[in-house]
Image (tube, helix red, strand yellow):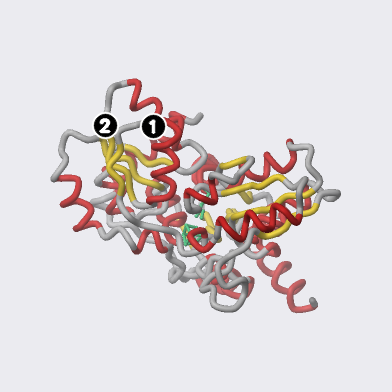
Amino acid sequence: AEQEAFYRDEIAKELKRQNAVLVAHYYCDPVLQALAEETGGCVSDSLEMARFGNQHSAQTVLVAGVKFMGETAKILNPEKRVLMPTLEATCSLDLGCPVDEFATFCDQHPQRTVVVYANTSAAVKARADWVVTSSCAVEIVEHLMDNGESIIWAPDQHLGLYIQNKTGADMLLWDGACIVHEEFKARQLEEMKALYPEAAVLVHPESPTAVIDLADAVGSTSQLIAAAQRMPNKTFIVATDRGIFYKMQQLCPDKEFVAAPTAGNGAACRSCANCPWMAMNTLQRTLQCLREGSNEVFVDPALIPRAIKPLQRMLDFTQ
Ligand code: 13P
Ligand code: SF4
């Protein structure tokens, strides 16, 4: 605890001294989430992280999250310095969608509009017409449908299926998955629902379809937190990374939050509702990168003009 207090103080001092702002995702260690808020930064879902970093006047944006979040901040703000506690924190969706294969896939279907999830590399974004996050994916696809467009969707197959089922859009789906959310199991969730008959089920749409089908609310991390506040239930079963419990509990102190079951339930499960890459963001690394100016995020300048277009479209659409 003493060490934690030391790191928090030092990080806060460095942020001030360097005119830097800390932007954290809800899956990060609660101590980083709290620090982001206390120091005038923000903790949010991936869409709001992008918007906050873009609108804030700080010259340095410190992004606690995974690689695509740092890259998004850099693409939108090439003139700012973007730092991350680690540059090793990737995402299985980003890894599962290499740009060469993806570009070939797109070239085979030139008449389709290319819509990609924010959880992708800068190079994949540069090949896209639209970037979306889970908080705006359905609305943007509906908008494209209204224009009579057919779609290529990548990389998350579960989110893609969810959008397709919801909108009826003509979508060709890439077969990527999130290693955290794909572990949630529908059968065990049904058993858990029987144990908590008055609980509401909150599900992030990167989860398998059978799990989404059991949900009372589906949405981005911010939308799930809003649902927990809005819904009258006293208990919630939550199918997403457990980092989100910090904010849910803070905003709803009288409610109870239970993690949805995963395959191994602790034993065999690789990720157990806890993203291994998000967990790489520690206080120690945060202070180190600020002090040393290390782990600066760079995006190939040749990609930036192309990658910024679909990102800016998303920001404009969701304003
Ligand atoms: P959100 O956009 O809902 O914050 O999700 C990002 C993410 O990586 C979920 O796994
Ligand atoms: Fe990627 Fe899943 Fe981790 Fe989110 S939780 S960053 S989608 S691996």
Figure check: 194 above or below 11: above
The image quarter in which residue 310 lies: top left
Percent position (x, y) of residue 164? Answer: 39, 37
Amino acid, disc 2:
Ser
First-in-chain label (2 vs 1)? 1
Could you tell whether 91 is left or right of 240 in the image?
Answer: left
Please say whether residue 222 is visible from this viewpoint.
yes
- Rendered location of residue 296, percent (x, y): 43, 64
Q: Position of residue 118 (x, y in %)?
A: 41, 48
Q: Residue at x 13, y 45 (%)?
A: 108
In the picture of the structure, the residue carrying the numbered disc 1 is 141
Residue carrying label 2: 150
Question: Residue 26 versus residue 195: which sits nearer the camera?
Answer: 195
Label 1: element kind: helix
In this view of the protein, can residue 19 be seen by the observer? no
Residue at mark 2 to residue at mark 1: CA–CA distance: 9 Å
Foreground: 29 or 102?
A: 102
Number of callouts in the render? 2
Image point 72% across, 58% down: which residue? 258
Q: Is residue 213 above or below residue 194?
A: above
Quadrant of the rendered image containing residue 30: bottom right
- Quarter of the N terminus within the rendering: bottom right
298 with respect to 286 (left or right):
left
Q: Could you tell me which residue is drawn at 34 percent across and 26 percent down?
A: 145
Residue 91, x across and y down, in percent = 43, 62
Q: Which mark is residue 65?
A: none
Q: Is residue 179 above or below residue 304?
A: below
Q: Is residue 236 left or right of residue 81?
A: right
Label 2 CB-ligand 1 distance < 8 A: no
Q: Amino acid at mark 1?
A: Val
Comparing 181 with 274, the one in front is 181
